[in-house]
Image (cartoon, rainbow, N blue to C red):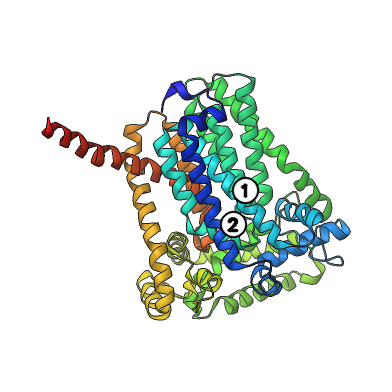
């Protein structure tokens, strides 16, 4: 880190990095996303209904249209209020729909712009904290990431907006990191916490992420406890105030001072279902149906019926049932948890790409295999030539980035004095890995990508300095 560059403006950082470098990076980033957007053709009515508005995306679409038409947060004008989703992404869609009509493809176009801004913010953040080379390497990998490209340019899902808020929060943290205690520093840390709150109102999985900032403050300012306490209290206050309107809305609507029922739902459906699939030898749908029926039976034993309860009341039974299963089989859950983390990082997403490219797509449930070897064999046997070709390209990218990130993790502590910044990057990446756990969906890896790519940038910078430059010095020495 060059301390002389800590007080440069955003434009001065662009000048330092090189306007040409920045322009090429952003052109590649937006260009790749626009190419896939053009191939997927989400403006086509058939594609919109058959591919875009499916599953979670259809739910977000319906929430947005209901907000516009009846100013209610529900899946339809006559439906009950929704407790599973948080409001920001449906509101984001609703704003665009209000301006341009009910056109999901315009939302997707907007997401491409947002993801390109995220790439730029990652570039300037890492340039500020570390070096221009590290920043360029990491942000280039961000621009090329096949999953960031896929979800920003073809889906009506909250992930791109969520990642943007996380990277923007990281940008404001980088602004404050090496500044003296002042109103401006307080403002930057406050804005960073605000953006973490907005991320949580986009996807509630980040509701505990402020703890990463608290740890960062305690480590970064351990020798100045009053300043550490000031930053901690400020961040907790602003994060809490950002969430409070939705917490009060849920309290007034459902009687629960909580963000969402998603934690209880995910604990049962995304954590217990995979664990039970192997034991019962049933597919996802069958196990999920059986577990929800079991939860309904628990309600009946208490003299209650699900149709008479609101979603938070039902969610209590989901959580109770999930905890029972996990506590009764901790070893099986631990195995499923570790396998889920493997799925998160090594799911290649071949089916989605094949479908978009109009190629034969073979779907199979990775959760149906309770060990990695069986999963690998099934992939090779079932995916066919198309799946293997697409998977090979994505696997090569993952091999490169993961290798760089591992080198970066192993070498960063000895090369960079700013260990608290390294720590907060590890905490932010690790948070989503640990919280996601068993679920193992490739979508859930997206918020970790900007942060482990920071270590990939550090790793490749280290290799460049110690291999390429060393050879050049050796060659020039022998010539002399």
Q: If the image is split into quadrants, where does the N terminus sit?
A: top left
Residue at 59% from the left image edge and 30% from the top image edge? 232
Determine whether, in the image, residue 153 is placed left or right of residue 302: left
Residue at 39% over, 37% down: 133
Q: Can you say whether 433 is above or below 154 in the image?
A: above
Front residue (pair 88, 289): 88
Can residue 452 be seen? no
Q: Position of residue 65 (x, y in %)?
A: 80, 61
Mark 2 and 1 residues: CB-CB less than 8 Å, in contact? yes
Residue named by callout 2: 152
**Residue 134 horizontal side relative to residue 170, left or right:** left
Tell me where residue 396 appears, x and y as whole percent: 37, 60
Depicted 116 relative to depicted 79: above or below = above
* Residue located beneath label 1 in the image: 114
Q: Quadrant of the C terminus?
A: top left
Q: Which image quadrant for residue 468?
A: top left
Q: Say few, some or many: other residues with alpha carbon within 10 Å of mark 1 (under 14 / 14 to 19 / 20 or more).
A: some
The circle drawn on residue 89 is none
- Tell which of 405 and 294 is nearer to you: 405
The residues bearing labels 2 and 1 have C-alpha atoms spaced at a distance of: 9 Å
């Amino acid at each position: 880190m060059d301390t002389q560059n800590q007080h440069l403006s955003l434009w001065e950082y662009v000048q330092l990095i090189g306007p040409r470098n920045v322009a090429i990076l952003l052109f590649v980033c937006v260009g790749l996303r626009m190419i896939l957007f053009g191939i997927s053709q989400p403006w086509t009515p058939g594609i919109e209904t058959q591919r875009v508005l499916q599953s979670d995306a259809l739910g977000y679409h319906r929430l947005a249209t209901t907000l516009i038409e009846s100013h209610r947060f529900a899946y339809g004008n006559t439906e009950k209020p929704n407790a599973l989703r948080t409001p920001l992404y449906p509101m984001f869609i609703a704003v665009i729909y209000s301006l341009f009509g009910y056109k999901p493809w315009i939302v997707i176009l907007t997401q491409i712009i947002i993801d390109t801004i995220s790439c730029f913010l990652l570039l300037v953040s890492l340039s500020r904290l570390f070096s221009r080379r590290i920043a360029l390497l990491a942000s280039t990998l961000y621009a090329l990431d096949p999953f960031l490209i896929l979800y920003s340019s073809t889906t009506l899902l909250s992930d791109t907006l969520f990642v943007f808020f996380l990277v923007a929060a990281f940008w404001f943290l980088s602004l404050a990191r090496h500044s003296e205690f002042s109103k401006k520093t307080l403002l930057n840390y406050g804005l960073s916490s605000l953006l973490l709150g907005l991320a949580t109102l986009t996807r509630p999985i980040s509701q505990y992420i402020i703890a990463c900032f608290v740890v960062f403050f305690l480590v970064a300012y351990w020798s100045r406890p009053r300043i550490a306490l000031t930053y901690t209290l400020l961040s907790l206050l602003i994060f809490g105030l950002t969430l409070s309107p939705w917490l009060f809305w849920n309290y007034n609507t459902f009687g629960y001072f909580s963000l969402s029922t998603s934690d209880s739902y995910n604990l049962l459906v995304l954590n217990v279902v995979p664990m039970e699939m192997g034991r019962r030898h049933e597919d996802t749908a069958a196990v999920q149906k059986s577990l929800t029926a079991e939860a309904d039976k628990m309600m009946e034993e208490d003299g209650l019926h699900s149709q008479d309860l609101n979603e938070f009341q039902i969610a209590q039974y989901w959580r109770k049932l999930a905890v029972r299963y996990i506590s009764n089989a901790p070893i099986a859950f631990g195995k499923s948890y570790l396998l889920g983390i493997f799925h998160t990082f090594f799911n290649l997403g071949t089916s989605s790409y094949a479908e978009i490219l109009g190629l034969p797509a073979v779907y199979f449930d990775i959760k149906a295999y309770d060990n990695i070897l069986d999963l690998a064999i099934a992939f090779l046997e079932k995916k066919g030539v198309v799946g293997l070709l697409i998977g090979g390209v994505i696997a090569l990218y993952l091999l490169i980035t993961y290798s760089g990130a591992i080198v970066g993790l192993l070498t960063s502590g000895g090369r960079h004095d700013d260990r608290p910044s390294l720590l907060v990057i590890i905490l932010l990446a690790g948070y989503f890995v640990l919280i996601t756990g068993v679920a193992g969906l490739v979508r859930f890896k997206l918020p970790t990508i900007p942060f482990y790519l920071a270590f990939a940038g550090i790793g490749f910078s280290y290799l460049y300095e110690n291999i390429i430059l060393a050879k050049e010095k050796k060659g020039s020495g022998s010539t002399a």
